[in-house]
Image (cartoon, rainbow, N blue to C red):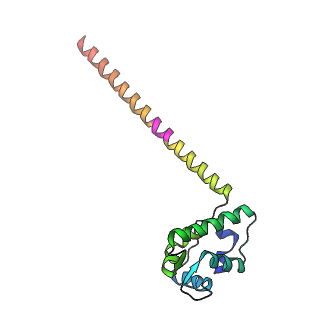
């Protein structure tokens, strides 16, 4: 399991589906000193032992930085117990290369631009419909007046 988690393919997915028993096995594998808590460094050591590697130094630095910051955010004294590890697994180990992060931001910006365009088109259609309704209503008044 740890080897699977450490694989290149995993790092580029949002998360890997593991059940509670599998997460417990992974946790125990990482918790080599059997303290009942793990640190970011223990995770990195275990993952590197099981084949974690990166094509670019920048990707490795980003992954390690994100991992450490997630432990700071979700841990107690930068340590996670089994429950915290299981609860935050997807957030802790999600990884994107810098290019993918920029690409995802661009996609989100494009989606927002499309949403704005659709809202604008809808607004224009409503205005045109109201205008046509007024024109039709005033022509119908004019024909009744004559």
Which of the image's four quarters has the N terminus? bottom right
The residue stretch that appears in magenta: 116-121
Asked where in the image residue 3 lies, by quadrant, the reply is: bottom right
**x and y percent of residue 137 in the render?**
30, 22
Above-or-below relation of 86 to 32: above
Left or right for 48, reference 32: right
Total numbered labels: 0
In this view of the protein, can residue 90 be seen by the observer? no
Identify the residue at horizontal 69%, vertical 64% (top origin): 61
Main secondary structure of the magenta stretch: helix
Q: Is residue 88 magenta?
A: no
**x and y percent of residue 63 in the render?**
65, 66
Left or right for 135, reference 94: left
Which of the image's four quarters has the C terminus? top left
Q: Is residue 117 magenta?
A: yes
Outermost residue toward the bottom in this view: 34
Asked where in the image residue 144 lies, by quadrant, the reply is: top left
**x and y percent of residue 130 in the render?**
35, 28
Identify the residue at horizontal 71%, vertical 74% (top origin): 52
**x and y percent of residue 135 in the render?**
34, 21
Identify the residue at horizontal 54%, vertical 69% (top origin): 72
In this view of the protein, can residue 31 be seen by the observer? yes
Outermost residue toward the top in this view: 146
Identify the residue at horizontal 53%, vertical 42% (top origin): 114
Above-or-below relation of 145 to 17: above
Work out whether residue 103 or residue 129 is closer to the camera in this orientation and state it. Answer: 103
Work out whether residue 122 or residue 28 is closer to the camera in this orientation and state it. Answer: 28
Outermost residue toward the front in this view: 77
């Amino acid at each position: 399991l740890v080897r699977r988690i450490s694989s290149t393919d995993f790092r580029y997915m949002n998360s890997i589906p593991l059940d509670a028993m599998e997460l417990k096995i992974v946790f125990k594998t990482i918790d080599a000193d059997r303290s009942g808590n793990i640190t970011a460094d223990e995770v990195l050591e275990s993952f590197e032992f099981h084949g974690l590697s990166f094509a670019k130094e920048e990707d490795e630095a980003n992954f390690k930085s994100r991992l450490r910051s997630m432990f700071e955010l979700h841990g107690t004294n930068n340590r996670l117990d089994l429950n915290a590890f299981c609860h935050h697994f997807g957030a802790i180990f999600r990884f994107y290369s810098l290019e993918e992060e920029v690409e995802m931001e661009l996609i989100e910006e494009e989606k927002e631009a499309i949403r704005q365009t659709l809202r604008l088109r809808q607004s224009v259609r409503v205005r045109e419909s109201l205008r046509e309704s007024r024109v039709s209503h005033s022509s119908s008044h004019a024909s009744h007046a004559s």
